[in-house]
């Protein structure tokens, strides 16, 4: 018998959330979230500080369960599936990930070790196939020349790109990026946005969800947008429909004017 709130095509959905809420203490971190992500979609989650973006992403990473409602990831229901089997199918890149590696870890090993679901190289003997793939991914993100460097010596931008390569190493079905451009200078941001745009436009790339505070960081090629404010969805759908001055103003609680220049966006107070 099929469950209520679960669509027939659940197997084709990478993420499905039905009436999801997350509570901590007396606070509603998320409330009434209904959301579906399909295989070929690239989503941006945009909202201010404390809106609930990271909470939503951690649920999509199978790191956190909802307090109410249901979450399906890759066709499996959270609460019923072994999350340790689910997590290797999901690439998750966040600021917290960076702190898990010893500073002396070689960049190439940070990427290769993703396949072994371990932090740190330990004593595994990696196949040359894995090494080749890691090298390819690093090169694709513009940091191939740093493969032999110690992770701790990388700049913030180089570290971010290394971690995205690591997240892609297991060939995930879902890629989650939590504020990948945070802390980057203008050049670093522009370079990362360009790399993420290439990834978004690659039909073989996994379904991708990117969290950000800034419309300037939306890489061309991203298809969908969810605007979050105070734990609730302000608007969601096709990026071109949802990204408007009105919706941005409602999300950030002030009058904002959105401008578009080619395939990039900018916003300022009206
Ligand atoms: N364990 C907790 N107990 C109480 N409140 C919490 C807890 N964890 C998070 N919060 C609150 O939930 C809200 C949403 O947090 P979340 O990290 O998801 O927001 P965010 O949109 O990612 O914010 P930011 O952009 O600042 O990183 C915040 O107000 C935060 O203080």
Image: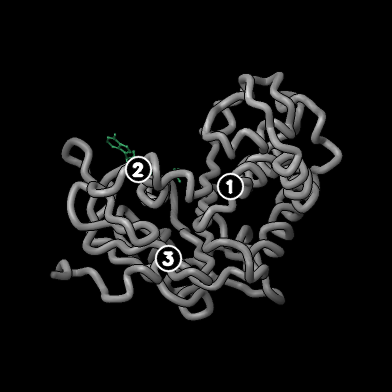
Residue annotated with mark 1: 170
Residue annotated with mark 2: 83
Q: Please provide percent x and percent y for residue 223.
A: 54, 73
Residue for point 22% across, 38% down: 24
Residue for point 56% across, 61% down: 206
* Disc 3 secondary structure class: strand
Residue furthest to the bottom: 241
Q: Please provide percent x and percent y for residue 129.
A: 73, 44
Determine whether 14 is above or below 48 in the image: below
Residue for point 29% across, 61% down: 17
- The label nearer to you, 1 versus 3, is 1
Q: Please provide percent x and percent y for residue 183.
A: 64, 40
Local packing at callout 3 (Cα closer than 10 Å; few below 14, some 14-19, many 20+) is: many
* Disc 1 secondary structure class: loop
* Disc 2 secondary structure class: helix
The residues tagged by marks 1 and 3 sit, at their Cα atoms, a distance apart of 27 Å
Residue in the foreground of this view, choosing between 237 and 173: 173
Q: Is mark 1 within 8 Å of ligand 1?
A: no
* Residue 205 horizontal side relative to residue 84, left or right: right
Residue annotated with mark 3: 226
Residue 233 shows which numbered tag?
Answer: none
Q: Mark 2 or mark 1: which comes first in sequence?
A: 2
The residues tagged by marks 2 and 3 sit, at their Cα atoms, a distance apart of 25 Å
């Amino acid at each position: 018998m099929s469950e209520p709130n679960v669509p027939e095509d659940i197997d084709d959905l990478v993420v499905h959330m039905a009436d999801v809420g997350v509570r901590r203490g007396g606070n509603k971190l998320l409330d009434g979230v209904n959301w579906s992500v399909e295989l070929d979609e690239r989503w941006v989650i945009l909202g201010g500080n404390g809106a609930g973006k990271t909470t939503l992403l951690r649920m999509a990473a199978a790191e956190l369960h909802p307090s109410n409602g249901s979450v399906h990831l890759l066709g499996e229901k959270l609460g019923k599936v072994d999350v340790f089997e689910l997590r290797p199918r999901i690439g998750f890149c966040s600021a917290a990930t960076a702190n898990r590696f010893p500073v002396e870890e070689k960049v190439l090993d940070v990427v290769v070790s993703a396949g072994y679901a371990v932090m740190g190289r330990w004593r595994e003997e990696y196949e040359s196939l894995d090494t080749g793939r890691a090298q390819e991914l690093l090169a694709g993100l513009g940091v191939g020349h740093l493969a032999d460097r110690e992770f701790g010596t990388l700049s913030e931008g180089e570290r971010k790109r290394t971690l995205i390569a690591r997240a892609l190493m297991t060939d995930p079905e879902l890629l989650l990026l939590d504020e990948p451009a945070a802390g980057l200078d203008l050049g670093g941001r522009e370079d990362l946005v360009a790399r993420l745009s290439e990834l978004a436009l690659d039909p073989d790339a996994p379904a991708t969800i990117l969290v950000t505070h800034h419309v300037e960081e939306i890489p061309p090629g991203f298809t969908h947008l969810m605007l979050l404010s105070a734990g609730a969805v302000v608007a969601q759908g096709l990026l071109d429909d949802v990204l408007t001055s009105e919706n941005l103003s409602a999300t950030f609680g002030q009058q904002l004017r959105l401008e578009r220049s080619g395939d990039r966006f900018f916003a300022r107070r009206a």
